[in-house]
Amino acid sequence: MTCPGRLWSAPVVLNTNLQVRLVINTTNATGSPSVRIAKDPRDNQLYYLKLNGDVFRLNLPIGGNATSTRVYSAADHGLASNVEGMAIGPDGTIYLTGNITTNQGNSTMAQVMKGVPNAGGTRVWSVLAQTEPYPRSRTAFDHICSALVLSPDGSFLCLNSGSRTDHGEVQSTGGLYPDLRDTGLTAKILRLPTSGSNLILTNDINILRNSGYIFAEGTRNAFSLAYSPNGDLFGTDNGPDRDMADELNWLRAGAHYGFPWRLGGADNPQQFPNYDPSNDLLLDPRFIAVHNGYYYNDAAFPPPPPNMVDPVINVGPDADSYRDPADGSLQVAGQTGATVRSFTPHRSPLGLVFDTEAALAPPFQRHGFMLSWTPGDPTGNSTPGPFLDPSQDMVDLDLIKLGNTNYQAHVTRIVAGFSNPVDAAIISNKVYVIEYGGSQGIWEVSFPAANSQIFLSAPSWATGQVFRFQISSAAGVSYAIETSTNLSDWVLLTNLVAPSNQLIFMDAAATNSPQRFYRVHRPQ
């Protein structure tokens, strides 16, 4: 697959310190759209995923044209439909999640596959986990299972299981499931041990909780999950068809993030007995749930759980538009002093990545970066999407932790004009964005690099009791790696030159020492 011509305008940088270039277009003969991009942390090799389960390896030669090669398909891993999640572990294991429609289209089930590298350079595929079949709503709001993320040590896999409703309304599937709203498996972040095999996830909330498979609850559709530099887990969440903010959540074990009682930091009015949708100024009839009458006086709406957690606070200057519920007017929080938690309604935030290695120069160092999928209107509300907000962009997230309660984020648009950007991966000082729309381009956004600083991260024991850690700096940097048992007397282990921005160092002798310290510096 080579890079054909592009017939529409390219993304443009809004910060002149950045550069953007097209790497490759990923449309192919199957017509299946691209949905994920991820790197193998062992060697920074990029892979991208198609909705039909095809996995491609991206070849990025220095000074040449990029190409891609299909390396796995449904024939290898068994997933052929709605394959919406991909993650790669520290040992190179690829994890995929797909969704299988059953029961004549009235039920669905998710399956998580893992492909473990073998000595021949390929991967051996097996089932990590699968859900029981659970009821679909057969509406636009079957959000199914999508995002995957590995814990930093690779021992657990978090999986987004989206809601089957827009905002907690009854969806009976034509009377097949009377009075059903969401289920034990939906609207949650599930957590699976990567050492598992053939795990069965039942549709019983109590069994899931008691088995330790539920990480967090009350998420509507956390389509992107990522760990920040300090190890905190974040997830983007798409909001409902009502004009309520899309979310960025700091995800913590055992917490409830509000769905469907609180969305975008505000109460869902359908839970209240006096709700009258004809007086609700946040309902836009251009949206499916509004047009189809899913907002109604709902006397049976269940009571809320205690101690719900609100989303990250957006302090601007961008992605902070809102509709005033008192008069229906369109406003920008930065101009009115209002608080938005987290983003302009209907942006559909996803593609979340962090500079965990401090590879970017200030002011971007250790920041997060996020994409938004839905086209918007920068000056008004002419389209059913974000208002007073163009969206389809990359924003910089400068997150500030507010004790142990929440975060606030300075949100700044830095690249505009993508075509339905859907996912991103970060390698050193470059972020790779893959598009769902148009010719499904992969774009490389280059940031100023940090000044050849050396960072050590991801210490762990590898197979065979070999101690390993990651060294990050600029390509071509010379390293002297030394060890000590007392932090006083240091012994040189090796001198080497890093072939790329990241290098995994392994020490088989570490298992013979009661304690062993390491330091890395440039030899004088």
Image (cartoon, grey):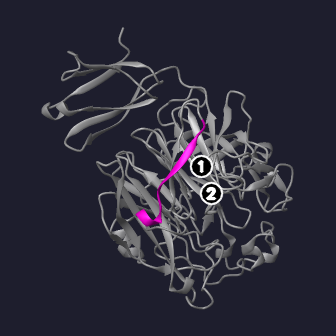
Residue corresponding to mark 1: 1
Q: Is residue 178 magenta?
A: no
Which residue corresponds to the image point at 65% horizontal and 58% vertical from the top-left? 264
Is 72 above or below relative to 204? above
Judged from the image, the secondary structure of the residue bearing numbered disc 2 is loop
Q: Is residue 54 visible?
A: yes
Q: Nearer the viewer, residue 263 or 10?
A: 10
Horizontal arrangement in the rendering, residue 156 relative to residue 429 (left or right) = left
**Mark 2: which amino acid?**
Asn
Tell me which corner region of the image, top left, top right, bottom left or bottom right, holds residue 52. Answer: bottom right
* Callout 1 secondary element: loop
Residue holding disc 2: 28
123 above or below 370?
below
**Residue shown at 86%/59% (left/top)?**
382
Residue 153, image x and y in percent?
35, 46
Q: Is residue 384 above or below residue 399?
A: below
Whichever of labels 2 and 1 marks the residue nearer the N terminus, that label is 1
Q: Is residue 236 visible?
A: no
Question: In this picture, which residue range is highlighted in magenta?
Answer: 65-76
Q: State how far apart marks 2 and 1 are (Cα).
A: 8 Å
